[in-house]
Image: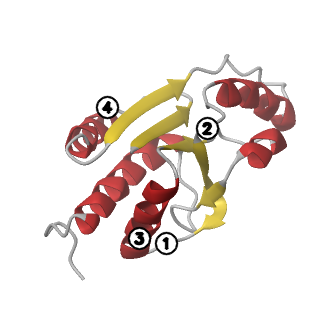
Amino acid sequence: MKIRLIQTGKTHFSFVKDGFELYEKKLGHYVNFSYAEIQVPNKDKHSQPDSIKKTEALLQLKAIKPTDFLVLLDENGKTYSSVSFANYLEKLSMQTSSIVFLIGGAFGFDESVYQRSNAKLAISAFTFSHQLVKLIFAEQLYRANTIIKGEPYHHE
């Protein structure tokens, strides 16, 4: 199964980059994992959030193939425990060969991206910066794969 994580915007924090690289490397032992950043044009301070979301949506939708199962990392999405997320991933792997998890920009997603999505996943009831979501999600994805394989990383 191929899993791709796409982040809207850049990562500026070095500790996030370092942590993400650690989990990215570990994930390679379990799945065909890749990561991409969508570079958005500099935001005009006077642009409206809807205008920004539409601009981002064009770039986001361009990065997704028609056959990809698209999961939006969205604060209004479904929440899972680590074990239930592992079960969800395992079921998805039997239904599709390519999953894309998409991290939105500061204002969330445009309606066109919601319409294209197959599912929404909330990392937490908290709101995090897109940079932290990248790191937190990578760790949870790694954790889910160790649970699936029955390895002793996760403790209950």
Mark 2 falls on what kind of element?
Answer: loop
Q: Which mark is residue 80?
A: 1
Q: Pointers 4 and 2 in contact (CB under 8 A)?
A: no
Residue 42 position, x and y percent, is: 67, 17
Q: Which residue is mark 4?
A: 14
Mark whose residue sits in front, 2 or 1: 2
Examine the rendered structure and indicate whether residue 41 appears above or below residue 4.
above
| Mark 2 vs mark 1, CA separation in Å | 25 Å
Give the mark nearest the N terminus, 4 or 2: 4
Kindly identify which residue carries mark 3: 87
Mark 3 vs mark 4, foreground winner is 3
Secondary structure of the residue carrying numbered label 4:
helix
| Mark carried by residue 67 | 2
Q: Earlier in the sequence, mark 3 or mark 4?
A: 4
Identify residue type, mark 4: Ser
Is the residue under label 1 in contact with that under label 4 (CB below 8 Å)?
no
Is 135 in front, or is 151?
Answer: 151
Instruction: Give the residue type at disc 2.
Output: Thr
Q: Is residue 88 left or right of residue 29?
A: right
Q: Of the residues shown, which amino acid type is indicated by label 3?
A: Asn
Spot occupied by residue 12 in the image (x, y as percentages of width and height): 43, 29
Q: Earlier in the sequence, mark 2 or mark 1?
A: 2
